[in-house]
């Protein structure tokens, strides 16, 4: 297996307390599919602050080239806002398989944000299946992604 393919099977995941149960579900689901999941917490249902986990996942991502990040909070909104403050992060909140497809094809999103209070486990599985099956199209979309990153201070 090429390094790139191997790394694409590495997933770095984090959630706040609202996403704690969903994180376990997603971790188990991806484990059964052969992914290697690095769990950055939270590790209990006790109340925590979602930015800590969105940022932790986004900061860990460049250490594992081509890995995927997954961040989960109640709505997916807070963790995605927080993750996108980190240079290089392209976090996309997905509530349907179509969002996941477009986030990968057009935005080359490298972090999937999920809402534990808005999305069922079954819907999450469908979103994950599409996310991992979909490649970035490049071309004009690369130019647009580059424009986004030109706004971020390293
Ligand atoms: C926690 O109650 C909730 O605010 C958080 O999980 C998330 O939905 C924030 O965007």
Image: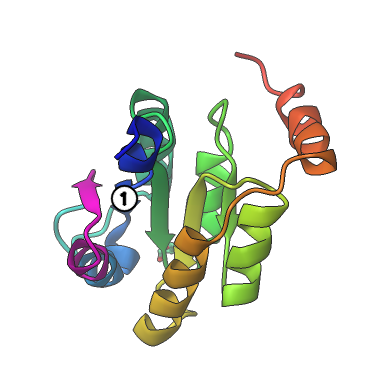
Q: Is residue 124 above or below residue 33?
A: below
Q: Residue at x 20, y 67 (%)?
A: 24
Is residue 123 at least partly visible in the picture?
Answer: yes
Q: Which residue is mark 1?
A: 13
Where, by quadrant of the figure, is residue 43 drawn? Answer: bottom left
Of the pair 65 and 52, the residue shown nearer to us: 65
Which residue shows up at 53% across the image and 30% down it?
A: 86
Q: Nearer the viewer, residue 85 or 63?
A: 63
- Residue 3 shown in magenta: no
Q: Classify residue 61 as left or right of residue 148.
A: left
Query: Is 67 drawn above or below residue 100 in the view shown?
Result: above
The reply to whether the magenta stretch includes residue 33 is: yes
Which quarter is ligand 1 in? Answer: bottom left
Beta carbon at label 1 within 8 Å of ligand 1:
no
Outermost residue on the left side: it is: 44
Left or right: residue 40 compared with residue 147: left
> What SS does tag 1 mark?
strand
Q: Is residue 144 left or right of residue 95?
A: right
Q: Is residue 41 visible?
A: no
Q: How many numbered callouts?
A: 1
Q: Quadrant of the N terminus?
A: top left
The quadrant of the picture occupied by the C terminus is: top right
- x and y percent of residue 150 in the render? 76, 21
Name the residue located 67 percent from the left edge and 55 percent from the top edge: 105
Residue drawn 30% across the image and 40% down it:
6
Image position, residue 134 (x, y; %) = 56, 59
Query: Which image quarter: residue 93?
Result: bottom right
Q: Position of residue 75 (x, y in %)?
A: 50, 68
Boundaries of the magenta span: 27-41
Mark 1 packing: few (<14 Cα in 10 Å), some, or many (20+)? many
Is 60 on the left or on the right of 110, as rendered? Answer: left
- The x, y position of residue 22, in whole percent, is 29, 71
């Amino acid at each position: 297996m090429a390094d790139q393919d191997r790394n694409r099977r590495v997933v770095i995941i984090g959630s706040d307390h609202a996403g704690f149960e969903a994180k376990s579900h997603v971790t188990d689901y991806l484990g059964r599919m052969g992914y290697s999941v690095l769990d950055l917490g939270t590790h209990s249902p006790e109340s925590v602050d979602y930015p800590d986990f969105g940022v932790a996942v986004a900061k860990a991502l460049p250490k594992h080239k081509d890995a995927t990040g997954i961040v989960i909070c109640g709505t997916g909104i807070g963790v995605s806002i927080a993750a996108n403050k980190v240079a290089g992060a392209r976090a996309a909140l997905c509530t349907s398989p179509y969002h996941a497809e477009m986030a990968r094809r057009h935005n080359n999103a490298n972090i999937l944000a999920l809402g534990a209070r808005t999305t069922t486990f079954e819907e999450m599985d469908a979103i994950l299946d599409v996310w991992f099956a979909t490649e970035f199209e490049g071309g004009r979309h690369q130019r647009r992604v580059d424009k986004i990153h030109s706004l971020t201070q390293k």
